[in-house]
Amino acid sequence: MKAKSIRGFNDILPEDTTRWCYVEEKAKATFEPYGFSEIRIPIVEFTEVFVRSLGTSTDVVEKEMYTFTDRDNSSITLRPEGTAGVVRAYVEHSMHAKSSITKLYYSGMMFRHERPQKGRYRGFYQIGAELFGSIYPTADAEIITMLMSFFEATGLSQYVTLELNSLGDENCKPRHKEKIIEYFTPLKGDLCEDCQRRLKTNPLRILDCKNPSCEAMARNSPSMLENLCDECKNHFEAVKENLNVVGVQFTINPRIVRGLDYYNRTVFEITTDRLGAQNAVAAGGRYDGLVKELGGPKTPAVGFAMGIDRIILLHKLTAPSGFEKEVDLFIAHLGKEALKKSFSLAYELRRIGVHTEMDYGAKSLKSQLRRADKSGAKYAFIIGEDELSRGKLTVRDMRKSSEEEVDIEEICKSAVKYKS
């Protein structure tokens, strides 16, 4: 029986890794000028880290986490998202004592037992950033502008939309929750099974349901923006003003609630109309109570996470070419001594960064040049016994089909001309 991967877990093949590296490098190049430093957190955490942070009534905790019992009878969970682990590390290593403001970014694989579909997998990748220590709306605006700068850097800004909302805080959230319950209770029989349960456990999550009938009913539900207290209203207005100052465009979407319990005040999503139903490519918001919930001091925080699988899909649609891995040159050889020289020459060329390929055995020149052509190499070096006796090799330009003879000892000195 042929071995195969687990459903919902994908291989990233060599023809795609160049594009993945490009996106990851653009993220790093965007985040670090803002003062963010990379943190690497474990793939597994004690289950309580996610239960305490995400909330017991969220879909993630209720039915999507990969949880198992360790050999010491501890409950262990593969991380379903990155923020909880970063907050746990922030608390455990007392980062708050080292600086009043801490800026961290992370990347890696996350795990949720969802129904696999295009752009939504059980093993998926995220890049995220978290800013700890500021209650001010300027911090919210900074993290959003940094995220939008990433989309600009990758050439995707014209294909995405920034959507904003505010969830309020502990003062105004309960009032809005009551109005949502009041609105949906007479409609309970028309809600999907999940939303009927949410009406009791987490009514705001009904607004995030993707069931068409629930979506239709939610359109006329009370807006949180109509129920914000003065402090939350002023905070949200200041976030918008800061975004306007730097020219970041956005739309207001009062239905954004996010699927995790720790959010308060500013929430946002980056969406696209190019990927069908899975339209969110990044999301985040403010979570001022999570550090304290995980045992740290009361610390305001704001952050986001990007779905890299979806960003790669979008990038492929909008920039289908230009990310193929290119071979600089191929060395073809004829004869035992020529093979030795080719191996030595390839070693020297690779040391100075020239992507060099060669054949490992004694194949015909025609066969080797056919492989050189198939590899996409821009140049081929041909070394035969006759050329070797004269200290020469032939350089063939594979694009122009032209040739010239060059001194072997001069090759490495001028090798930069063969490098991409």
Image (tube, rainbow, N blue to C red):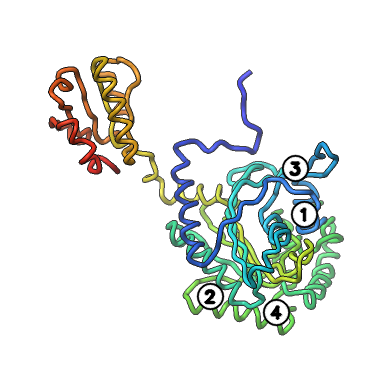
Q: Label 4: how many residues lie within 10 Å, few (<14), some (14-19) or many (20+)?
A: many
Q: CA distance from mark 2 to mark 4?
A: 17 Å
Q: How many marks?
A: 4
Q: Looking at the picture, how far across and down is residue 348, in whole percent?
A: 30, 34
Q: Which residue is mark 2?
A: 243
Q: Is residue 9 above or below residue 212?
A: above
Regarding mark 2 in the picture, which secondary structure is present there? helix
Regarding mark 1 in the picture, which secondary structure is present there? helix
Q: CA distance from mark 4 to mark 1?
A: 28 Å
Query: Which kind of residue does numbered mark 4 sit on?
Result: Cys
First in sequence: mark 4 or mark 1?
1
* Left or right: 114 as drawn, with respect to 198: left
Query: Which of pointers 3 and 4 indicates the residue nearer the eye?
Result: 3
* Left or right: 342 as drawn, with respect to 296: left
Q: Looking at the picture, how far across and down is residue 197, in whole percent?
A: 84, 55
Work out whether residue 259 can be spotted. Answer: no
First in sequence: mark 2 or mark 4?
4
Q: Which residue is at the front of the view, 52 or 374? A: 52
Q: Looking at the picture, how far across and down is residue 232, in whole percent?
A: 70, 79
Q: CA distance from mark 1 to mark 2?
A: 33 Å
Residues under numbered marks 3 and 2 in contact, where contact means CB atoms less than 8 Å apart: no
In percent of the image, x 71 and y 53: which residue is there? 211
Q: Which residue is at the front of the view, 162 or 184? A: 162
Query: Which of pointers 3 and 2 indicates the residue nearer the eye?
Result: 3
First in sequence: mark 3 or mark 4?
3
Q: Which residue is mark 3?
A: 66
In percent of the image, x 65 and y 71: which residue is there? 165
